[in-house]
Image: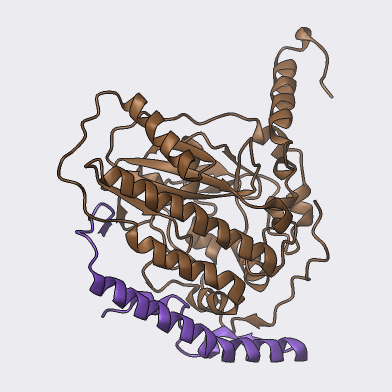
Chain colours: A brown, B purple
Amino acid sequence: MRPTAPPPPRYAFGYQKPPVSGNAINGLGERQASRARKVFHSSSGEPLAWKALDDFFSVINPWRVVRHVIFNTWQLRRSDGPVRAARREVADPRAMAEEIKAAARRLGASLVGVAEVTDEDLYEGREPGLRYAICLGMPMDRAEMEHAPQARAAAEVMRTYREIARVAVRLAEEIRAMGWPARAYGNPNSTDILMIPLAVRAGFGELGKHGSMIGVEHGSNFRLAAVLTDLPLSLDSPVDIAVDDLCLVCRRCVDDCPPRAIFDEKQWVRGQRKWYVDFDKCIPYFVKTYGCAICIEVCPWSEPGRGPSLSAQLLERRRAQASPSDGGTPT
Amino acid sequence: MRTLNASDPGRSILQDLRLLRSIGSMVLQYWIQGGRLRREYRRREARGETLWLDALGETQHREAPLHRKP
């Protein structure tokens, strides 16, 4: 997919006195591990350095996008609630995890996995309280997303968030009915947790060069939600689908990003060397185009049905390179 | 510090009504104040001018009514 005539990165909005760089807040260049700090999407209305731009973004979004946010807000009133007094004891966390995954799929999730919540997954100033995260993923309609970076794609993004949040809310209700605390997280604008590190450890995929997740089934064309709970569950493991093998040589997202916000090399960010997107370049374009999404849609992994064969081919190539005597070079 | 397991004791109809009122405010704010801002932005965009966000004074997030204390 190639974006059709994306608007140029010129802006009719801006700051006379720009706030502190979002990259500095995000910890770009920091080799010391630290917790993530909120920079843009406000949680609970707390003031952030880029508040004026965030506020502007929130009101320039078209109604077709905002209506999904409104419905999501209404359904998320049930993200937490009373826990049934009679607790169902769990003798086998593995069997329970399978039961929960089947329930999540029945409710409409495409991807389900479990990870333990660590400090790395929480913004500064938040304490976990609940031990496990049930990560949920749902693909977006590719035909709609091919309209990125137009409002039509933004509406599909928020529709998907609304749908996956519905699954999270219902799953949390089912867990509370078993006598275990559970809280649904399904609003991308006001969350306390970082979904991506959790989803990576839950086995959904790996972080891509464009700063979003890449999974084998949907590439980057999916959205995340989570349920935090104390219900004993067996954990999933991160997967190696060879994302880095491609991202290290592929430049599709770098070249197709109108504001040139995607670094071609991994960066140090809060003590980890990882893929990172330049906040100060990305966010104004993100605001102008109601969420952009070019990078995730041009990603070769996002082409429907391509992920499994791409992953297999890259893993095979890696194996062949590791032991050249084993065979030739796969095409 | 906010602990994420502070379990909600259960919502009352009153709480739901308050949320509905907040959502109503959010919608009104989006159409009235937001509409004004969107028109101003489009006007400046058409003229090749810049809307200075830090010169707008105290701005409000679309979801601000949800965070207001009752």
Quadrant, the C terminus of chain A? top right
Up/down of A110 relative to B32, above or below = above
Judge whether A249 appears above or below A226 on screen: above
Q: Could you tell whether A153 is left or right of A111 in the image?
A: right
In the image, is A108 to the left or to the right of B23? right
Q: Residue at x 45, y 55 (%)?
A: A165
User: Considering depth in this image, is A279 or A185 the residue closer to the camera?
Assistant: A185
Query: Residue at position x 43%, y 68% from top?
Result: A42
User: Is residue A319 visible in this depiction of the protein?
Assistant: yes
Residue at 30 percent across and 40 percent down: it is: A131
Q: Position of residue A132 (x, y in %)?
A: 34, 40
Tell which residue pokes out farthest to the left in this image. A85
Q: Nearer the viewer, residue A58 or A143?
A: A143
Q: Nearer the viewer, residue A242 or A26?
A: A242
Q: Residue furthest top?
A: A325
Give coordinates of residue B40: x percent, y percent. Answer: 64, 91
- For the image shown, how many numbered marks are present on the structure? 0
Measured as percent of width and height from the top left, residue A23 is found at 55, 60
Q: Is residue A51 above or below residue A314?
A: below
Confirm whether residue A130 shows in the render: no
Position of A76 relative to A99 (above/below): below
In the image: residue A146, left or right of residue A242: right
**Quarter of the image where one finds residue A274:** top right
- What residue lies at 72% left-to-right and 46% top-to-bottom? A299
Going by the image, does A217 lie left or right of A113?
right
